[in-house]
Image: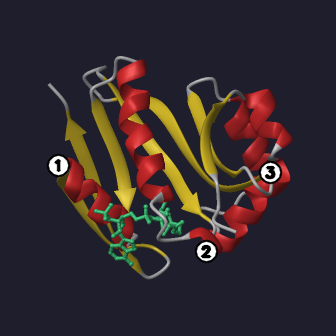
Amino acid sequence: MEPNIIILRTPPYQTKDFRKDIFKVNKACFRYNEYRFTEESFAKTLAEKETTFHLAMDKNKHKIIGYMITSEFRLPNRSKYLYLYQIAVHPKYRNLRIGRQLFDLFITEGKRLKINIFRLHAINPAVVSMCDSKGFKKIKFFKQYIGKNNCTLFELRLK
Ligand SMILES: CC(C)(COP(=O)(O)OP(=O)(O)OC[C@H]1O[C@@H](n2cnc3c(N)ncnc32)[C@H](O)[C@@H]1OP(=O)(O)O)[C@@H](O)C(=O)NCCC(=O)NCCS
């Protein structure tokens, strides 16, 4: 059966209800400790009021198969920016444009919050491709940033 995907922007109490699924996706997607949730780090993330979860759900199976976490921060000049902390789609659901839909909501979320600066660290080629397509600029390059991966800090400034 074709997956029937919906994406929800979830408040912490609702996100918590999907904890098990989110952990499964997190574990299937990330090998590095920096990205792996522990009970403690997940609870801390949920408690941060500047942090938002978007969850991608397979409606036929009523389970979460992807998510995106964004958070508000400030630059040294006090301007706010929205940071994409994690984006993940379960390997069984890849290449179905779910990551792209989540990424589009990164920009939508910034507009909702009246934030026009967006940042993220990208190590993944699909994320780099999504940044390029939205006009993100490369700000800084880090060699062997996480694990053995090179990483680029991307930024988008909307007028
Ligand atoms: C990154 C990730 C979320 C993409 O999810 P996805 O649902 O498979 O992505 P999509 O099908 O929406 O594809 C998004 C874009 O990336 C491109 N893409 C996908 N895989 C790619 C690859 N290996 N190399 C280059 N581009 C790729 C697609 O062509 C698409 O581009 P387009 O929209 O211009 O056509 C998924 O690969 C993932 O969870 N990876 C592991 C976790 C991770 O590394 N997250 C990023 C760090 S936080």
Tag 2 near tag 3, CB within 8 Å = no
Alpha carbons under labels 3 and 1: distance apart: 34 Å
Q: Is mark 3 within 8 Å of ligand 1?
A: no
- Which percent across, then down, holds residue 65? 68, 59
Relative depth, front residue between 80 and 20: 20
Vertical position of residue 116 compared to residue 2: above or below: above
Tag 3's secondary structure?
A: loop
Vertical position of residue 107 compared to residue 25: above or below: above
Q: Quadrant of residue 23?
A: bottom right
Amino acid under disc 3: His
Q: Which residue is mark 1?
A: 135
Which residue sits at x=78%, y=32%? 14
Q: Quadrant of ligand 1?
A: bottom left
Which residue sits at x=70%, y=63%? 25
Mark 3 is surrounded, within 10 Å at the Cα level, by few (under 14), some (14 to 19) or many (20 or more) other residues, namely few
Q: Is mark 2 within 8 Å of ligand 1?
A: yes
3 or 1: tag closer to the N-terminus: 3
Tell me if residue 30 can be seen: no
Q: Which residue is mark 2?
A: 91
Q: Which residue is mark 3?
A: 62
Amino acid under disc 1: Gly
Q: Nearer the viewer, mark 2 or mark 3?
A: 3
Say left or right for 41 vs 99.
right
Q: Name the colour scheme.
A: secondary structure
Tag 3 near tag 1, CB within 8 Å = no
